[in-house]
C-alpha cells in the first residue's frame, strides 16, 4: 500500500487549469509565488507519504474506540495530527487576521487531496473544520470570530457540521432539535440546545481539547420546514475567563457507528442537553440557519468531490504497481509463450488507462472549481457564479469516478483484490460513502436541474457549455458531446419538474464529462506544446498526452450516449410493482 505523491501532476494542473499564477498577480494572493506553490505541493506530499499513509491500514483494522461517551483514536493518530497542526497545514487558506496564511483555497484543496490519498478516513477531520471556518467568516460576529477562529484555523480545535437526525436525513427541514433563548442570568443571550444528531463526522475524539459543533435547531414558534431553522455554535466545552475549554457543556457522544469503510473516522451519535444544560451561540439571524449552513455545505461538497480524486489516485497507484509485478500468461498472439506481467495484456492496460484518465479528469475538475472560488474572492463575479454551477458536478461526478476507479482497482488485482490484506478492498469500501454524504449524488443532480439551471434562465450553464465548445474545436468526440449537452439543456429549461428530475442524473454525467473533456483537452494541448518545445519531464508529458487522448476518445463518447436517458422524461420511469 505504498503511496507516492503525484507532485508533478498536481503542479501541472495548478499551472494549466487552476491558473495559480493569475491568482498571484493580485495582492490578496501575492504570496502564492511559483516557489511557494512548489514548496507547498512538495512538502505536503512528503508529509502525507511519511506521516499519514502508514496509518491508513492501522485506522482500517484498529478502529476508534468508544467508551462511556469518550472516543480514543487508533494508535499513532494523535501524534500525526499534532504534527499536522504544528506544521501549519490546516491554516493555509485561513484568514490572516485569525492566524491563517491567506493563501488560495485551491492550495488548501491540494493539501487535503494529498492527505486524503494517504489516509482518507483520517483526513475527514480538517475537512469539516474548514467548513466551520467559512461559515463563521460569512455569518459570525466579530466576537465569535475572535473567540473561536484562531484555534479552528490552526487546527488546535476541530469543527463539525450537525444536520442529520434519526427522522430527518436528507429532509433537513424535518429536524426536531430545539434552541430556547436564555433571557436572564449570566447566560442571557445564549440558547439552550436539546436534541440528537447522527452521522456526525469526528463528533467525538481525543485529537483536540475542544470540538466546535455547528448545530441546526429550531427556536420556539419557528415555522416548520427549512425556513424555521437556525444555526448555533455549540462547543464540547465552554471557555473559562482565561479562554480555556474547561466547562462541561452538556454535549455527549452516545455511540459511534460501525461502517462499511472510512474506519479511521469516528462517526458519532451526538446528544445535546440531555443531562445538563447545553448552551450555544446563534450564528447569523434566527431562522437564517440554512443560509449559513450552505456556506459550510458548499465547502464540504467540493472537499467530498476531492475525496473521489483521493481514493482514485491511491487505487490507481496500487493497481499499476500490482500489474507491473504480477506475472500471468503469455501475451495473446505472441509466438513467445513466456508469461508476462499483466500490465502487458490489452484489457488490463485498458483498465489502468481508464483509471488514470478518470483520476486526472476528476482532479482537473476539482482544481478548476476551487480556482473559480478563489477568483470569486478577487471580485470576479463570473468566476463566483461558475463555481456555483460546478459544485454539484464536482461532488457527484468526482465521487462516482472514485467508486469506479476503486472498483477497477479490485478487478486489476483479480482474486487478490477481494482479499483484505492487499488493500484494494479498503479503497473500494472507503470510496463508497462519498456519493452519499454531504447531499447524495441524486440531490446534486436535482440541484443542477433545479436551482443551478434556473439561475439566469439557464444562461450560467449555457455559458459553461459555450466555453467547452470553444475548447473542443480540435476534438470531434468532445464537440459531439457539447452539441448533445446543449440540446438537453434547452429541453431541460422548458421541461416540467418531474421530467427534469427524471433525466437529472444522466444530464449531470454528460455535463460533468464534457467539462472534464474540456479540461483534459487543455492539458493535452499544453503537454504537446511542452514536448515540442523540449520543456519539462518528457516521460510525464508523453503519459499526459496518452491519458488525455484516452479520455477524449474513449470516455467522452460514452457520455454522449446518455442523451436519450436525459430526455426520456418522467413517463419513462413507471411505478415499481409491489413486492410480495
Image: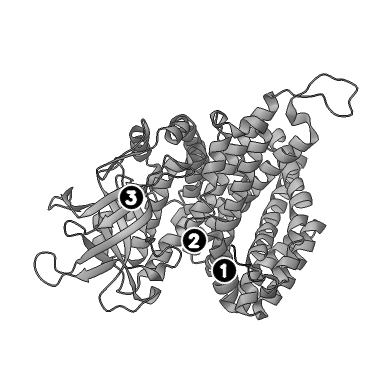
Q: Earlier in the sequence, mark 2 or mark 3?
A: 3
Quadrant where the C terminus lies?
A: bottom right
The residue carrying mark 2 is 439
Callout 2: 10 Å neighbours few (<14), some, many (20+)? Answer: some
- Residue 333 drawn at (x, y percent): 89, 29
In percent of width and height, residue 479 lies at 78, 62
Q: Nearer the viewer, residue 424 or 98?
A: 424
Picture coordinates of residue 43, whole percent (x, y):
47, 36
Q: State the mark number for residue 100.
A: none
Determine whether the residue tagged by mark 1 lies in a helix, strand or loop: helix
The residue positioned 30% from the left and 59% from the top of the image is: 196
Q: CA distance from mark 1 to mark 2?
A: 10 Å
Q: Residue 147: percent from the left, percent from the top?
A: 23, 56
Left or right of 228: which side holds 305?
right
Residue indicated by mark 3: 203
Nearest to N terminus: mark 1 or mark 2:
2
Taking 273 as reference, is 11 left or right?
A: right
Any part of residue 291 in sight: no
On residue 446, the disc is: 1
Name the secondary structure under disc 3: loop
> Which quarter of the picture shows residue 84?
top left
Q: Residues within 10 Å of mark 3 (few under 14, many from 20)?
A: many
Q: Is residue 288 visible?
A: yes
Rendering quarter of residue 290: bottom left
Residue occupying image coordinates x 47% and y 32%:
57
Which residue occupies 77% across, 23% down?
340
Q: Quadrant of the N terminus?
A: top right
Cβ atoms under marks 1 and 2 closer than 8 Å: no
Residue lying at the far front of the rendered structure: 580
In the visual, does 83 lie left or right of 147? right
Amino acid at each position: 500500500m505504498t503511496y507516492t505523491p503525484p507532485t508533478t501532476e498536481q503542479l501541472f494542473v495548478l499551472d494549466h487549469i487552476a491558473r495559480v499564477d493569475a491568482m498571484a498577480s493580485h495582492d490578496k494572493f501575492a504570496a502564492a509565488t511559483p516557489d511557494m506553490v512548489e514548496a507547498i505541493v512538495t512538502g505536503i506530499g512528503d508529509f502525507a507519504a511519511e506521516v499519514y499513509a502508514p496509518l491508513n491500514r492501522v485506522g482500517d483494522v484498529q478502529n476508534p474506540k468508544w467508551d462511556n461517551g469518550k472516543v480514543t483514536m487508533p494508535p499513532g493518530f494523535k501524534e500525526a495530527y499534532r504534527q499536522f497542526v504544528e506544521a501549519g497545514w490546516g491554516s493555509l487558506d485561513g484568514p490572516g487576521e485569525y492566524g491563517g496564511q491567506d493563501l488560495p483555497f485551491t492550495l488548501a484543496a491540494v493539501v487535503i487531496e494529498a492527505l486524503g490519498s494517504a489516509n482518507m478516513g483520517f483526513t475527514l477531520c480538517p475537512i469539516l473544520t474548514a467548513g466551520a471556518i467559512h461559515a463563521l467568516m460569512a455569518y459570525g460576529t466579530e466576537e465569535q470570530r475572535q473567540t473561536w477562529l484562531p484555534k479552528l484555523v490552526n487546527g488546535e480545535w476541530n469543527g463539525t457540521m450537525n444536520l442529520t437526525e434519526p427522522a430527518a436525513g436528507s429532509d433537513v427541514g424535518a429536524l426536531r432539535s430545539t434552541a430556547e433563548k436564555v433571557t436572564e442570568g449570566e447566560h442571557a443571550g445564549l440558547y439552550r440546545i436539546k436534541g440528537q444528531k447522527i452521522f456526525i463526522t469526528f463528533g467525538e475524539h481525543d485529537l483536540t481539547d475542544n470540538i466546535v459543533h455547528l448545530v441546526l435547531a429550531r427556536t420556539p414558534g419557528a415555522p416548520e420546514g427549512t425556513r424555521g431553522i437556525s444555526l448555533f455554535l455549540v462547543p464540547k466545552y465552554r471557555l473559562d475567563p482565561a479562554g480555556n475549554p474547561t466547562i462541561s457543556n452538556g454535549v455527549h457522544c452516545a455511540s459511534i457507528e460501525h461502517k462499511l469503510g472510512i474506519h479511521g473516522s469516528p462517526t458519532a451519535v451526538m446528544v445535546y442537553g440531555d443531562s445538563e444544560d447545553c448552551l450555544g451561540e446563534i450564528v447569523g439571524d434566527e431562522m437564517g440557519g440554512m443560509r449559513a449552513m450552505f456556506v459550510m455545505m458548499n465547502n464540504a461538497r467540493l472537499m467530498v468531490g476531492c475525496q473521489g480524486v483521493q481514493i482514485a489516485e491511491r487505487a490507481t497507484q496500487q493497481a499499476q504497481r500490482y500489474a507491473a509485478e504480477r506475472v500471468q500468461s503469455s501475451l495473446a498472439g505472441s509466438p513467445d509463450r513466456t508469461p508476462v506481467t499483466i500490465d502487458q495484456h490489452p484489457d488490463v492496460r485498458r483498465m489502468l488507462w481508464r483509471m488514470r484518465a478518470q483520476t486526472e479528469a476528476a482532479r482537473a475538475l476539482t482544481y478548476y472549481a476551487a480556482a473559480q472560488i478563489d477568483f470569486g474572492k478577487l471580485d470576479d463575479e463570473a468566476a463566483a457564479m461558475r463555481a456555483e454551477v460546478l459544485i454539484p458536478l464536482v461532488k457527484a461526478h468526482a465521487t462516482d469516478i472514485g467508486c469506479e476507479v476503486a472498483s477497477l482497482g479490485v478487478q486489476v488485482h483479480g482474486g487478490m483484490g477481494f482479499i483484505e490484506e492487499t488493500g484494494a478492498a479498503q479503497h473500494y469500501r472507503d470510496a463508497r460513502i462519498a456519493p452519499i454524504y454531504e447531499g447524495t449524488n441524486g440531490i446534486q443532480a436535482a440541484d443542477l436541474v433545479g436551482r443551478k439551471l434556473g439561475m439566469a434562465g439557464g444562461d450560467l450553464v449555457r455559458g459553461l457549455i459555450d466555453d467547452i465548445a470553444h475548447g473542443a474545436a480540435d476534438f470531434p468526440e468532445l464537440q459531439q458531446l457539447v452539441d448533445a449537452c446543449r440540446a438537453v439543456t434547452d429541453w431541460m429549461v422548458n421541461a416540467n419538474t418531474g421530467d427534469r428530475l427524471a433525466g437529472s442524473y444522466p444530464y449531470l454525467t454528460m455535463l460533468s464529462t464534457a467539462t472534464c473533456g474540456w479540461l483534459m483537452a487543455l492539458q493535452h494541448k499544453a503537454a504537446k506544446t511542452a514536448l515540442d518545445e523540449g520543456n519539462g519531464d518528457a516521460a510525464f508529458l508523453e503519459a499526459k498526452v496518452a491519458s488525455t487522448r484516452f479520455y477524449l476518445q474513449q470516455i467522452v463518447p460514452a457520455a454522449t450516449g446518455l442523451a436519450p436517458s436525459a430526455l426520456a422524461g418522467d413517463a419513462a420511469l413507471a411505478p415499481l410493482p409491489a413486492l410480495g
